[in-house]
Image (cartoon, helix red, strand yellow):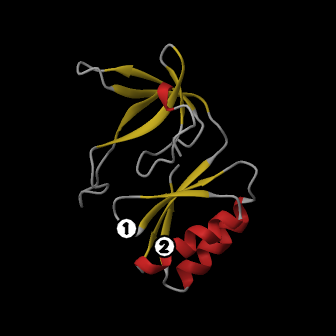
Amino acid sequence: MKGDSESNLVKIYFYLEQDDDGYPPVATESLWARELQDNMYCIDNIPFYAKGVSLNDIVTAKPNEENLLFFRKIIQPSGHSTIRVIIFEDADVSSWQHELEKFGCASEKDYLPQLISVDIPPTVDIQNVWALLEEGLHNDQLEYEDAP
């Protein structure tokens, strides 16, 4: 979901806590963000693994010794919610993305072909999204988790 003006986009890195099984499969995740002013950025894509941050949140970041920007804190939440969905059949991924789009939710595919990250804007009735996902869960088509 990179913005139209890519010239002011930067990567912000988030440290991730891996569980005993090694999930998530990476120790850090980088998200695109638009620079607003000194050390303040607006998240410009949907996170896959970083918890507590969503599309359009305003955050602060600070460069490390390699000059990579690392997340510090959220300054202003956007009201968006993020969920991760694992769809059991590769062929069903696009159709699930299409169904979620009908509710006004954008999604992105991960490098793992069955994993999508879903943005739920504050204008979307989240109960409708939960109902759709619960149906998929009960039909053994998917699993999902909220990314609080």
- Please tell me how crowded label 1 is: few (under 14), some (14-19), or many (20+) other residues with Cα within 10 Å: some
Q: CA distance from mark 1 to mark 2?
A: 8 Å
Q: Position of residue 136 (x, y in %)?
A: 56, 79
Q: Which residue is mark 2?
A: 93
Q: Quadrant of residue 71?
A: top left
Residues marked 1 and 2 touching at CB (< 8 Å): yes
How dense is the environment of label 2, judged by Cα within 10 Å: few (below 14), some, or many (20 and up)?
Answer: some
- Residue occupying the point 34% across, 63% down: 112
As displayed, is residue 86 above or below residue 54?
below
Q: Quadrant of residue 19?
A: bottom left
Q: Nearer the viewer, residue 59 or 9?
A: 9
What residue sits 49% from the left and 25% below the top?
8
- State the residue position of label 1: 113
Q: Residue 101, image x and y in percent?
A: 65, 63
**Residue, x 70% and y 66% (percent of image)?**
102
In the rendered image of this protein, does residue 61 appear above or below residue 25? above
- Amino acid on which the number 2 mark rests in the picture: Val
Q: Could you say which is closer to the camera, residue 28 or residue 36?
A: 36
One can see residue 9 in this view: yes
Badge 1 or badge 2: first in the primary sequence: 2
Residue 2 screen position, x and y as percent:
51, 41
Amino acid type, residue under disc 1 in the picture: Pro
